[in-house]
Amino acid sequence: MSLVGAIDQGTTSTRFVVVNDSGAFVAIAQMEHDQIFPNPGWVEHDANQIWGNTERVIAEALGEAGVSASHLSGVGITNQRETAVVWDRGTGEPVANAIVWQDTRTADIARALDTEHGADWFRDRTGLPPATYFSGPKVRWLLDRDATLRSRAEAGKLAFGTIDSWLTFKLTGRHVTDVTNASRTMLMRLDTLEWDADLCAAIGVPMEMLPDIVPSIGRIAPCLGVLEGTSLSAILGDQHAALVGQAGFERGATKVTYGTGAFLVSHTGQDIVRSRAGLLSTVAYQIEGEPASYALEGSVAIAGAGVQWLRDNLGLIDAAPDVERLASTVDDNGDVYFVPAFSGLFAPHWRDDARGVFAGLTRYANKGHIARAVLEATAFQVGDVLGAMASDTGSILPEIRVDGGMVHNDLLMQFQADILDADVVLPSNVETTVLGAAYGAGLATGVWSSPSDVSAHWQEARRFHPAMTTTDRERLLRGWSKAVERSFGWVGG
């Protein structure tokens, strides 16, 4: 029996899994890390804490499996993508907390880039509009506030990377990133898969800081320390890993992952499809020695994070799974809508001036309606993104494959099918993000011989069919659209 390992470094936690050649989990360990909110709209992580947690979960999972690192054919990394880390090349110490993908402090920089160059200038080169979401402007923000840091960066003394690059540096000593993560920085051209001097100059990030770009799936480097004896063989941003974990290797394959945010990715083959409906063009993955595959993506900032907010900030539930029970105490949303624009709205609206609102409140509304509105907000947002996808591709999907923690919520999955008027399909293993990193490592090291070999492991577990009337669907969508409009212009208005 062959084994591979996978690190899943997410927005709220880090885990390590050991996976066998049947695609089954042999062992898993997980630890949460701190969410740091220094100012409204700011979100930070302690990169050293993340690294320490990574070491601990690796050791714990290997111990649970009863194996050493040398028993692993290879290891993959999947990660929260746009979170930016800057560290000293000599000491290996971060110069500041990591700035998380949800952070909105770069709103002025994004607007300035739009004014100076235009959104289309960036979209044509990177597939991305100027937005707070992406990591390049986060690095500029750090350097703009400390002339000494900028001087050190220009002298090549500082390294920038997304979380995958930070973990790779700690695990192997190499400063690299893969094409999927690089495609989310606003600094790499989609067509050449290389850092672009014009983009770096426009955004204000010295090229001396940047890691080498490598394919997502291939032999990257031998590991050191806690994983000494095996090699790093795959790096995939979390949504790209989920596409691989859903066996989305064919053009048109589409998945939605429900985690902290919600992310819809549709494989477009070796063609870069330029969105005109507010979606992102991105790299899907690249296997070493082969051309890159591309995708369209729609990103929703707040999905599961909305449930966490109900738990941690409002205290309406004790644990995240309780939200379904509370929402089920009412028959419908009571005409209450929740727009979770805590960090603005991502695709397809791209409004950093939006903020969260509850709309339609009356004295009839109770905490059950609030819980239901929070759940339904995720489905409405995914519906907006899928509508944009249909506009760009000219096709309406009869079904979508879904994964992530929220798919265990039957109320949400049924409502999603109802709002989309399409089947929602769950795989037998919904942990497709970490599974995709494992598959990548196994493809690179010969555990699986080809993508079709991986696809043979995908199995359907459940299917939700739409059961809502057209009248009810249209009424709910009208209410949602009105609520979204009321969230616009809160900042700066």
Image (cartoon, helix red, strand yellow):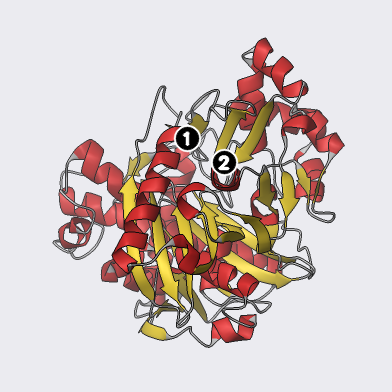
Q: Quadrant of residue 136?
A: top right
Residue in front for this viewpoint, 70 or 40:
70
Q: Is residue 464 left or right of residue 138?
A: left
Identify residue type, mark 2.
Trp
Residue denoted by label 2: 166
Reply above or below: 108 against 81.
above
Relative image position of residue 205 (x, y in whole percent): 74, 29
Q: Is residue 156 left or right of residue 235?
A: right
* Cβ atoms under marks 2 and 1 closer than 8 Å: yes
Tell me if residue 54 comes above or below residue 433 in the rendering: above
Q: Residue furthest bottom?
A: 456
Identify the residue under disc 1: 47
Reply above or below: 111 against 191.
above
Q: Quadrant of residue 170?
A: top right
* Residue 393: x %, y % from top left: 69, 70
Sequence order check, earlier mark of 2 and 1: 1
Q: What element does badge 2 sit on?
A: helix
Instruction: Identify which residue, 91 or 402, lies in the foreground.
Output: 91
* Residue 12 in view, yes or no: no
